[in-house]
Image (spheres, rainbow, N blue to C red):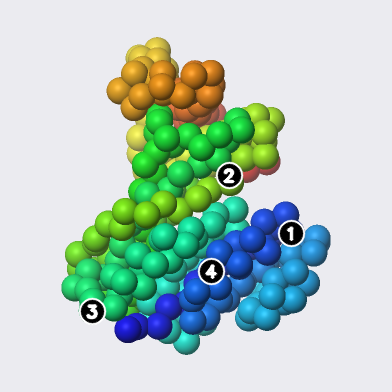
Amino acid sequence: MPRVTVTIITRNEAAHIGAAIDSASWADEIIVVDCGSTDETVALAAAKGVRVESRTWTGWIDQKNFAASLAANDWIFSLDADERITPPLADEIKARLREDPPEAAYKVPRISFHLGRWIRTTDFYPDYQTRLYDRRAARWSGLYVHESVTVTGSVGRLSQELQHYSYDDLSDHLDRINAYSTLAARQMYERGRRARAFDLLLQAPAAFLRNYILRGGFRSGSAGVIVSALNSYYVFLKLAKARESGSRTSDLGPR
C-alpha cells in the first residue's frame, strides 16, 4: 500500500491545530508549514511530534505545493487546520490505496459545522474537495481564490466525509465574505469578466433560490435561511466590487 503524507499549512491556528493533527494520526507522515504564527500554533504542532517548517507566506497555492514538495511520500492528503479527517474517511483512504487505484486523485465530500449544527444542505454540502492526490500527477493551481488541484489523469470520489469547522460565528462568516469577495472580484476583473447592472439585479437572488430551494436549504430551518442569504450576499458583494473596479483606474486588491 502506498504511504501517505498529510500536509497542513497554518498561521495562528492554535485553536485547531492539535485536533487537526490528531485526526491525521493514521498517516505515515504529517508536515505542518507555518507562516509566522504569533500564537502557540508551532509549539502545539511540535509537541505532537510532527515535522514543522516555517516559511514566509507566498499564497495559498504556492504554500500548499511547497508543503507537498517536502513529503517523503508521493501520495498527499492536503488538510486545512480547521478540518478533521474522520475515522471512516481514514479507513476509506487506506482501503482505496490498498487496491492500487488507477486514479491520480480523489475528491472527498466536505461537511461544515456552522450555527450550531452540521449543514447538509445549500452550497455548503456536499462541498467536494480534491484533497487526496499523487503529487507525481497533480499539483495546486489557481489565482487568488478557489485554489484547486490540477490533475493529469482520472479523479475518483470517496464517500466518507471531511469535517470542516470554518466559522467561529456569524461575525467571522461576514469577515470572510468581505475578504474573499474582494479577492474574487479582483480575480474576475483580471480575467476580463465584467459585472453588469443586470448581473447585480439577478445573480444574487438566483443564488438565494439555488441555495434555499434547489439545494434544500429549507430543510435546515433557520440555519438554511441564514446560509442561503449569506451565500447570496457573497455573490452580490463580489459582483459589486468587480463593477467598482471597472469604474476606477486604481487596482482592486486587499487593503
Q: Which image quarter: residue 114?
A: top right
**Number of the label disc, if any, that sits on residue 53:** none
Q: Earlier in the sequence, mark 1 or mark 4?
A: 1
Q: Nearer the viewer, mark 3 or mark 1?
A: 3
Direction from residue 116 to residue 46 in the image, left or right: right
Residue at the image point whose x is 65% and y is 73% from the top: 55
Q: Secondary structure at mark 2?
A: loop
Residue identifier under label 2: 166
Q: Judge left or right: residue 23 versus residue 210.
A: right
| Quarter of the image that includes the N terminus | bottom left
Residue under circle 1? Answer: 14
Marks 1,4: beta carbons within 8 A: no
The amino acid beneath tag 3 is Asp
Determine which residue is flagged by label 3: 100
CA distance separating discs 3 and 2: 33 Å
Looking at the image, tell me whether mark 3 or mark 4 is earlier in sequence order.
4
Task: Give the amino acid type for the residue marked by disc 2 in the picture.
Answer: Ser
